Image: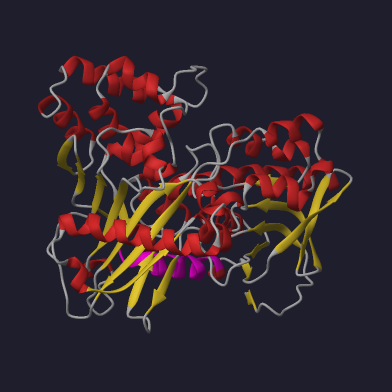
Amino acid sequence: MQYSSKDKIEKNYDVIVVGSGLAGMTLANKMARDGRSVLLLESHNKLGGFATWFKRADNSHVFDVSLHGFPVGMIKTCRKYWNKDIADRIHQLKSVRYINPQFDIETDFTKEDFIKVLVEKFKVEQATVDAFFLDLATMNFYDNSKMTNGELFEKYFPGRSDITRFLLEPIVYANGSNLEDPAISYGIVFSNFMSKGVYIFQGGTDLMISLMKEELLKNGVDIQLQARVDKILIENKKAVGVVAKGHSIYSKAVVSNSNLKSTVFKMAGAENFSPEFVKKTEAVRLNTSSCQVYMGLKKGESIPFIGDLIFTSEDRDFSTDLILSPKVGSQTFSLYYPEMRPHLEPSYAIVSSSNSRYEDWKKLSESEYKAHKEYLIERALSGLEKIVPGIRAKIDYIDAATPLTVERYTLHERGASFGTKFEGLDVSMNMHKELSGLFHAGSVGIIMSGWLGAANYGVIQAHEVDNYLSRLEKASV
């Protein structure tokens, strides 16, 4: 059932899930299917976490915040852990483009096409390309290699910043990875993205989350929106419930789909963990944040098909600092044509995304913040105008979101759009070994970031929670 925001929940549950990102929702759905009683609590007024949307101008414009593409594996995950209807709506993007001072390339983003481009466009020996992709394919989470992304590219393509840009730039936008991150984080994610192209949910995030909500309720998950959890209840080193809106709700296990550091330091309390675990959690680096500019075309206006996803940059060279620069030299345009939402009146929406640092926005005064948002919007318009001349005159709605916007609506510390760096995964996976019954699922460790990574991590943690509950049941017999 769905509780109203004013309801006082008196029931006890097997599992309480704090936060309804894709990890939290997928975990809740699987556990309910497996016969567990589940309560899903969400602080916002709708489910989805960063997989969300909003409407403007009397609902004539619908904007997807993070529906910019995910791997083919999302089809299998949705079919197995959600339903066939959701899985069948996942379609492949037709065209991914790169436009920058070093090259102008269009690809279908498959492994076969990337090999062709590297050999024919960048003139790399076939044997080198084959060795590179073999190296990616054999990487696994348990490797002890200390090689960074930068070292990986230099090993196979020395001195080729153009190839580094071609290979890494999409992943920077997908999960915040950079040249200094472990190569394993790049290898696993890029292999997934490259296997069979980039996919998207036809119908929009709003339809997808609506269908997921129906499935959750059908399977018996209880849901309460606008129910911010202030505290996770800990008794005798065991999670026994939560405090939401000043009211205690009890359960056998608690799963946090909130920010990793917020879970430990704000909700559970550092005093309940060992000093070693606290130190390890303190050392976890939060990933970078992002900005978006949302542009809606006037009713009756249109643009030709120019690609689904366009990575653009005016920077002569590629570097982590330039990608994150407040000057916004690099940005990605996601284009949503009328067929994106065929059930609605034909409309066009364009979302510009750029990676950014939280601190670059947090330090601004109110007037500086407003001015930089206007600068961000102008950079999006000027960049788009080079691809679609005359586009300004066709737009009747435009607004921007910043890392502070992300922080406000998702409660992610520092507006971390992509969760944590690689070391966050170890802390997340071992939280229940510190406090019995307390689990974490969400965007951690880069490889568990993005839509597919988050959903799959929810499945992984659902198994852990179920094993824990089974042990409790056996012990009570």
Q: Position of residue 265 (x, y in %)?
A: 74, 46
**Looking at the rendering, in which quadrant would you find the N terminus?**
bottom right
In this image, 362 relative to 186: left or right?
A: right
> Height in image: 341 above or below 468?
below
Q: Position of residue 461 (x, y in %)?
A: 60, 44
Q: Is residue 89 visible?
A: no
Q: Position of residue 472 (x, y in %)?
A: 79, 46
Q: Is residue 23 visible?
A: yes
At 47% from the left edge and 26% from the top edge, which residue is drawn?
A: 182
In this image, 47 relative to 296: left or right?
A: right
* Nearer to the camera, 132 or 236: 132
* Nearer to the camera, 258 or 15: 258
Main secondary structure type of the part rendered in magenta = helix
Magenta-tinted stretch? 201-216
In this image, 36 relative to 173: left or right?
A: right
At 72% from the left edge and 43% from the top edge, which residue is drawn?
A: 468
Task: Confirm whether the magenta stretch covers residue 206.
Answer: yes
> Height in image: 247 above or below 345?
above
Task: Confirm whether the magenta stretch covers residue 234.
Answer: no
